Image (cartoon, helix red, strand yellow):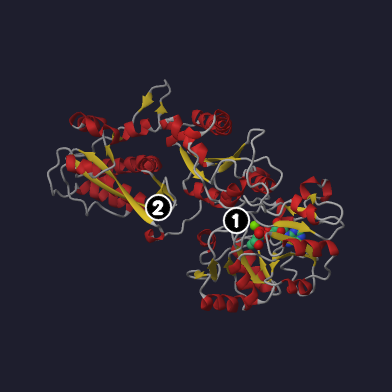
Amino acid sequence: MERAKIYKKTLLIRSDDREGIRDCVHHLKDGEVIGFPTETVYGLGCDARNGEAVKKVFAAKGRPADNPLICHIGDKSQIKDIVSEITPMAQRLIDAFMPGPITLVMKKSDLISYETTAGLDTVGVRMPSHPAANRFLKEAGIPVAAPSANLSGRPSPTSSRSVMEDMDGYIYAVIDGGDSEFGLESTVVDCTGTDPVILRPGAVTKADIDAVLKSGEAVLAGSLKGSEAPRSPGMKYRHYAPYARVEIMKMPEGVEIKGDNASGPDGRTGRYEPVDLKKLTDDEAKELVNIASPFILRSREILSENPFARIGLYCGGEIKAMYGKLNDKILSAHTEFCVYGNTVDVASASHGLFEGLRFLDVQEVDVILAQGFDGDGLSVAYMNRLSKASGKKEDLTPGMPAPARPSRTPLPIDAFKDTVTASVLFVDDNNTSLSACCEILMRILLEKNEPYISDSSRDTGFEIYCESAGLTAMDGMDPDPDMDRAVKELTGRGLGSIESRRADPAVYDCNDLILTVRDEQAFAIIKAFPEIKDKVFSLSTFAAANGLVMKDSSGRVMSISVPDPSGENFETYLHTAKALNAWLELLFPYIIKDLGASRV
Ligand code: TXA
Ligand code: MG
């Protein structure tokens, strides 16, 4: 289905904005699509009785029309209107789990349009427990058909920002209700047969369901054979797929998992209590090494195949701490972490999974290594989503949109509690040509990749500055006109704003990373000021320090050499500017990592 923007900007409504919510309800009843928070993931809601409105949801998601939508209600009394029969088994499940993260598939009534159920005679009924969802649905008073608010095939959104990332311009408004509590979609249970069939595992586990049944037990849909599966049409489609390839790192046997009983007291906090590695007992330390080993071994294997690979880790805080202790600079330079909480806590891992996959995609990693869990409660739902995210692309249903690098929604820097800054300096001899070119190219890259957060704390914003100077420069000289023209031709922006200046200790002091164009220049700085040697590199030694080495056919390491075009024709300048741009694009993630920042 063709996906077309129909709004200039999707409205973002705060959940305590009564007027705004009323306006959303008005537009919902008028056939528009509204994004809203739930305790599982955000949904894209529309009037379930209105086939035309439902079509808009399919269009906004780019979703195949044979995959039915769930009907959301704000009050249990609505159930009798949207289903034709409530069996005693369904009633038990309603009493036990609604409102909450469960969807019950029952025979539909005439009220619900066939567009909502994709032609099926059954309908999925769900009553969310999220207070903002509940207020919105109560105020609407109509059955609201809603799939998860992601672009079809992408990880489900668990924050309003992720909904905006996928839906800005495609729907009327999004109601912001903070981060979703569970982070995985509801348990879908087919109640049309004698025994309940779990079509999609979720935070309400099989054990939870079995505990309230009078007789029999729930069947997991995966255990159905042949023509019977899949009973939930959604199961055959690619899901949750980030751009990067996903690999699951197995949890070693015998490790005690926390939060597997999602409805228990230790579930779904997402809170992280950092563990002091020094305080671990020998057994605990050994267990941690066993959990971390698959990550480390696999990462080294990937890097030995491709020294340019960038690896994302979806893992616990202890694993990140262990990497710190390993002190393998090259491994660390190629690793981007997304920490969900304590390593053994599957509730935190579930809570953060979809945002984590999106976050690591933004870091433009090639591979994501994600922690696996082998429990039989919430772990089943977590592994279900993670396995789909790691699904081989060639096994997927054709006709789905190819996963694209996500576009990113700008965040105002005041979205953060604190902001820290860092700066990178480019140095050459006279600061009128090559270093000025690097400064402008880097500024453009920095703007393109904004905003940034601190590596060590995700609520701390990070501003990155960039400047240039020359070892033998005179102050206040204009840039070389040919380089100015070359950069303008390449980027649309010239060197006009840059006046040359001499590099000196005061300039070095203000910068956290100093990159010279040529090796001799870095050596000269280090010779004069050995105390700053840890932050001074040439482009080529910085690349080498980050493991970015290319070897020629005889195995010799090739270094980055930038010729000086001065006195040559314009084409040589353009060639040089292009070469510098290519190098800076390659080095960019390593530069921001060196400064202590991540993209967000
Ligand atoms: O937690 C959730 O369930 C979220 C929030 C927004 O409520 N919604 C959600 O919707 O995940 P969606 O459309 O992304 O996934 C619904 C799943 C699909 O796999 C679909 O095939 C299945 O439920 N489903 C819906 N109606 C069904 C029906 N009548 N029979 C069988 N499966 C059904
Ligand atoms: Mg979905």
Image coords of residue 401 (percent x, y): 60, 54
Q: Secondary structure at mark 1?
A: loop
Q: State which quadrant residue 594 falls in.
A: top left
The residue sitting at 53% across, 77% down in the picture is 18
Q: Is residue 518 above or below residue 155?
A: above
Image x and y of residue 323, in percent: 47, 34
Q: Is mark 1 within 8 Å of ligand 2?
A: yes
Q: Which residue is mark 2?
A: 460
| Residue tagged 1 | 156
> Closer to the camera, 381 or 289?
289
Residue at point 85%, 55% (across, down): 195
Quadrant for the N terminus in the image: bottom right
Of 542 and 19, the residue lying toward us: 19
Q: In this rendering, is residue 40 above or below 526?
A: below
Q: Secondary structure at mark 2?
A: strand
Q: x%, y% of residue 487?
A: 28, 49
Q: Which mark is residue 515?
A: none
Name the amino acid type tagged 2. Thr
For discs 2 and 1, the disc positioned in front in the rendered view: 2
Q: Is residue 163 visible?
A: yes
Query: Can see residue 67?
Result: no
